[in-house]
Image (cartoon, coloured by chain):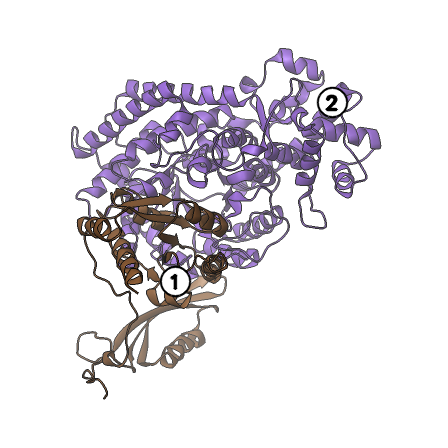
Chain colours: A purple, B brown
Amino acid sequence: MTQLHLDQAQIDRARDSARRIARQVFDEMAQFTTTTVERATLRLLGVDGVDENFVPLPNRVVEHLQAQGLLQYGAATLLAGAMQEHGYTAQQVAEAVAQGTLTLTRPKDEAAARQAAEAQARDRCAHIAGQRAHRDEKIKTLGEGQAPWLYLIVATGNIYEDVAQARAAAEQGADIIAVIRSTGQSLLDYVPYGATTEGFGGTYATQENFRLMRAALDEVGAKVGRYIRLTNYCSGLCMPEIAAMGAMERLDMMLNDSMYGIIFRDINMKRTFIDQFFSRMVNAYAGIIINTGEDNYLTTADAYEAAHTVLASQLINEQFAELSGLTPQQMGLGHAFEIHPELENGFLWELAHAQLVRQVFPDASLKYMPPTKHMTGNIFKGHVQDTLFNIVSTVTQQNIHLLGMMTEAIHTPFIQDRFLAIQNAKYVFGTMKDLHSEIEFKRGGLIEQRAQAVLAETEAMLAEIETISLPTAIGKGMFAEISRTPTGGKGLDGVVAKADNYYNPFPQLMLPETLRDRPERSDALSSTDQGGLRDRPQRSEALSSTVLEASHA
Amino acid sequence: MLETQSPEQWVKPYGDTLNDGRVQVSFTLPVALNETSKEGAKRLAALMGLDEPAVVHCEDMGQGFSFYVVYGQCKHQVDLSSFQVVKPEYEVMDKDAINARIAETMGRRMVVVGACIETDAHTVGIDAIMNMKGYNGHKGLESYHEIRAINMGAQVDSEELVAKAIEEKADVILVSQVVTQKNIHLDNLTKLSDLLEAEGLRDKVILVVGGPRISHELAKELGYDAGFGVKSYAEDVASFAINEWNNRKAA
C-alpha cells in the first residue's frame, strides 16, 4: 500500500508522551475501586437477577456492603466467605442478602475465602474463555466478511424488532450489528434486566437482550456463511458490568472509550478512569474488539481544525488499552469523515487524516465513522456524502466501517435506508477494490503536507498534556472543546479507596502476565495460582484467526 | 367587511411540464418480492393519490422484505392562498443589532439558560445555538456580549433546568430535543412546561424549543413561545427573544 512520508521518530515521541500520560493516571487510580467494578465482579462470579422492585441483585449486594462499611475490601472475598460458611452458591448469597436474611461480614478465614473466590473466578473465566474459543472456531468454519467490515446499527427500542432488522441487515451484507442503547442508559447506575421492548432511540443493553441477539446472529450467520459480529455499548456508569455481561454472552465488539463518558456524558473523571481499566481488562480477556469514540470530538469541534485532537486521543486510548491487556488488533480506534462539505479540498484532508491514522496504527482495527454533523434532510446529497466516505475508507484500508445513512439527521434508519447504504458501500468497495495499491500520494503534495502538519500538532498537544496532566487537559477543554473537572460529573460517590488488603481475583486471571501485580503480592494470596495461564486462551493464536485478516496494513 | 382575499394559487408537483404532478416515492413492503407484491406496490401508490403509478425499480431485501421505487402523477393540488402558516413574528437582526437592542431596551444583559433535557443526549443542536463557535459561520449566543448564555449540556432533568433558571434569573429558557422516536420529545417538553407552570414561572420566562423535528406550530401547541427547526441560527433565536421581551414589556 502506498505510504505517506511521515517522521517515525515524531510518531514515537508522540506515543511515548501518551504512554506516560496514561501511566500517570493509571497509577493514581489503582488505589481505588468503584461500585460498578464490584458489581461487575459479582456478576462475573455468578450473581444475576433482580429483586421484587426490579433492582438488580449486584446492586443490592454492593449497597449492602457499603452500608456495612465493607466495600473497600472488595466484594469477592465477602461473597466467597459467605458461600463457604453457608454452603450457598453466589446467587443464593445475593438472594439471601436481598431478602434481608443474611448479613455479610468479613470472613473468619481470610485466606480460605480468597482461595474460594479465586477458584470461583477461575471457573467463571473458563466459561468466558470457552466463549472466546467458540467464536474463533465459528470464524474458522464459517469465515468472515472482508475488511472494511460493514457495521450497521439497529435501534428500534424493541429487541424482537431489532432481531428482525439485524437478520435482514446480515442477509443484505452487514458484517457487524450494533444495537444502539436506549438514550439515557449511560447515566443509569444499574443495568436493566430481562428482554426489553420499550426503549427510546435504542434498546436497553441487558444480558437477556445480548443473548437473544447473539442467538439470532449465530443463526443468520450460519445461513449466510459468515460470522456476524455483535456490538454493544460498554460505556456510561456501568462500563465494567456491561463488559462482564458481554464477555459471558459472546459479544464481539464494545464501544469502550477511556474518556468519552467524561467529556460527553459528564461522568466523573476518576470513576471513568477506574471503570475503563476494569472493563477493558474483561474485554481483552474475552477477545472483544473495543471501539473508541474520537469521532464524537468532531461533532462539537471543527473536523479540520481539531484533527490533531483525534490522533492525540487515539494515542492515549491506545496506551490505556495496552495497560488493560488489549492487543493492537483489539483496538478499534475511532475517527470520522466530518469535514464541512463546502470546504475546498475537504476530501483531500479527509484522505490525509484517514491515511495518517492508518500509518500511525498499522495493526489496529481502525473504526471509521460516516458523516453526521453535516448531513441535512437532503437525502440525495447525503447519499453522495456517504459515497465519498466509502471511497476514503477503502483507499486507506480502514477495518470497521460504520455505514452512513442518507437519512442521518432525520430519523433512526428505516430498513430501506440500511439496504441502500449497504449497496452503496459494496459498490464502492468492489469497483475500487485494489485502487489503494495502484495509486501513490504525491511526495510533498497537499495531502502529505496536511498529514505531516496534523502529526506535528498532535506531538505538541501530547507534550503539553504530559506537562499539565490529563485531568488538567480535560479541564481546559482540550478535547471536543468541552471542559470537565476531577470532582465534577456523575458517579464520584461510587468511587471507593481500596483497603490495604483489598482483593479482586480477576486481574490476576485476566491480565497478561506482564501486566499483573508483582509476585510478592499474588504469592501471598494463593499458592494455587499456577493454573492461571491454563484457562487463558492463547491470545496471539486466537486473535490471528479473529482479526488478522482485518488488519491489512 | 371581509378582508380582500388574495387570489387563488393552486399548485401541484412539477416534473418537466407545468401541472404534470410527477413525484417519486420509495418504500419497503414487509413481504418477499414477487409479481403479487409488485402489483401491490403499484396499487398502494394509486391509493396514495398517484395516477399512472409505475414501479421503476424493485428488489428483494431478504428476510421477507422488498423495496420499491415508484413514479406517478399526483392527483392533488393545493391552493397556497387558502391557509396561513404560523411563524414567529419578528425581524431577524444581526449580532450587533441584537446587542444594541438589548443594551438599549433591557439596560442589562439578557440571561439565556439552555439544555438538552431529560434522556436526550444529543448536544449538537443546543451547542450550535449557544456555544461560542456556533454553527456554519453563525456565532453562538456565548459570543454575544449583551447575552449571558449558560449551556447546561445534555441529559439535564427538567427540575434541574428550572432550578438553574430560577438561580440565574433567566429571561429565556432554551431547550433542545433531538431524539423524537416514539414522540418522547413531546413528553419531555410537556413535562418542562408543566413544571414551569407549577412553579409560577411560565409567564416570567420566554420559553423556546429547538430541534430538527420542531416547528413553530408544534411549539405553540405545546405551550412554548417559539420553536426553531433546521437552518435556525443564534441570531434567529436571539432576535425572537429580544423582540418577545419588548412585546411583553409593552403589553
Q: Position of residue A324 (x, y in %)?
A: 52, 26
Amino acid type, label 1: Tyr
Total numbered labels placed on residues in the image: 2
Q: Is residue A91 above or below residue B107?
A: above
Q: Is residue B186 above or below residue A474?
A: below
Q: Chain of mark 2?
A: A
| Residue A281 sits in quarter | top right
Q: Nearer the viewer, residue A542 or A370?
A: A370
Q: Is residue B8 left or right of residue A552?
A: left
Q: Is residue B194 above or below residue A537?
A: below
Where, quadrant-wise, is the N terminus of chain A in this rendering?
top left
Q: Residue at x 51, y 20 (%)?
A: A28
Q: Is residue A238 left or right of residue B212?
A: right
- The residue labelled by disc 2 is A115
Q: Nearer the viewer, residue B148 or A264?
A: B148
Q: Position of residue A212 (x, y in %)?
A: 60, 51
- The residue labelled by disc 1 is B224
- Outermost residue, bottom direction? B1
Q: Secondary structure at mark 2?
A: helix
Q: Position of residue A80 (x, y in %)?
A: 75, 29
Label 2 Cα neighbours within 10 Å, binned few <14 / some 14-19 / many ≥20: many
Q: Chain of mark 1?
A: B
Q: Residue at x 46, y 20 (%)?
A: A23
Label number found at residue B19: none
